[in-house]
Structures are given as C-alpha cells and as structure tokens.
Amino acid sequence: MLDLTRRFDAIVTATDVSHGKPDPEPFLLAAMRIGIDPGRCVAFEDSTNGLIAARAAGMTCIGIGPGTGASARLADGWIVDFTDLALGQLVME
C-alpha cells in the first residue's frame, strides 16, 4: 500500500529461508542479496532472537528499545528508536 518495496535493494522474509531467527540464515541471505560481506553490515533488531541471529551472522548489532534485560549485552549499542540522536554515532563507529 505504501509502495515501500522500491526503496530497498533486497527484501528477505520468512518464506525465503529454511531457518528463521535465531538462525543467522535471514541475515546472511540479505547480505548475499545486496552483495556485501556480513561483517560490513549493521543489523537493527528489537528482539533477542534477532540479535542472536545478527551476531551469529557476524554483523554489527544495534538494539532498538530500552536495552535492558537478558538481551542488553547482545547488541553493540542501543537506540530507543530511529529518531535517537545516538544512532549517528553508533553507525559511524
């Protein structure tokens, strides 16, 4: 409805992979589709399983949310949302 798909070079959904999160397959497939080494990618995640999957794929992980609880240490950094001023600094590190 919003015609957002044209804004992305690649899209990976659950139907594209055999194993979903926390398996790294979705992240590895996304990196392959855009032709970038996973180690040069930054994953933004709001779930523990997503952070585990991104970390297993070898990506830098930015958590979205409060950054508390069991998943707090799974991310390289945290932002509250995409308007968080810390976003620019985290991505540039």
Image: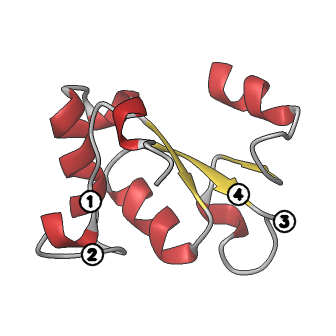
Name the kind of residue labelled 3 in the image.
Pro
Residue 47 coordinates in the image, percent (x, y): 58, 72
> Crowdedness of circle 4 by 10 Å Cα count: few (<14), some, many (20+)?
some
Q: Mark 3 and mark 4 in contact? Answer it, CB < 8 Å.
A: no
Q: Mark 1 and mark 3 in contact? Answer it, CB < 8 Å.
A: no
Say which mark, if any, is on residue 64: 4
N-terminal-most mark, 1 or 2: 2
Helix, strand or loop at disc 2? loop
Does the image show residue 93?
no
Q: Give the residue furthest to the front.
A: 1
N-terminal-most mark, 4 or 1: 1
Residue 28 coordinates in the image, percent (x, y): 23, 49
> Crowdedness of circle 3 by 10 Å Cα count: few (<14), some, many (20+)?
few
Q: For the point 38% across and 27% down, which residue is it?
A: 40
Does the image show residue 7?
yes
Which residue position is annotated with label 2? Answer: 20
Q: Mark 1 and mark 2 in contact? Answer it, CB < 8 Å.
A: yes
Say which mark, if any, is on residue 26: 1
Q: For the point 78% across and 51% down, which residue is it?
A: 81
Residue 70 coordinates in the image, percent (x, y): 69, 80
Say which mark, if any, is on residue 82: none
Question: Quick check: 49 above or below 33?
Answer: below
Q: Give the residue furthest to the left.
A: 18
3D distance between C-alphas at marks 1 and 2: 6 Å
Helix, strand or loop at disc 4? strand
Name the kind of residue labelled 1 in the image.
Pro
Name the kind of residue labelled 4 in the image.
Ile
Residue 85's image quarter?
A: top right
Helix, strand or loop at disc 1? helix
Say which mark, if any, is on residue 66: 3
Residue 44 coordinates in the image, percent (x, y): 56, 49
3D distance between C-alphas at marks 3 and 4: 7 Å
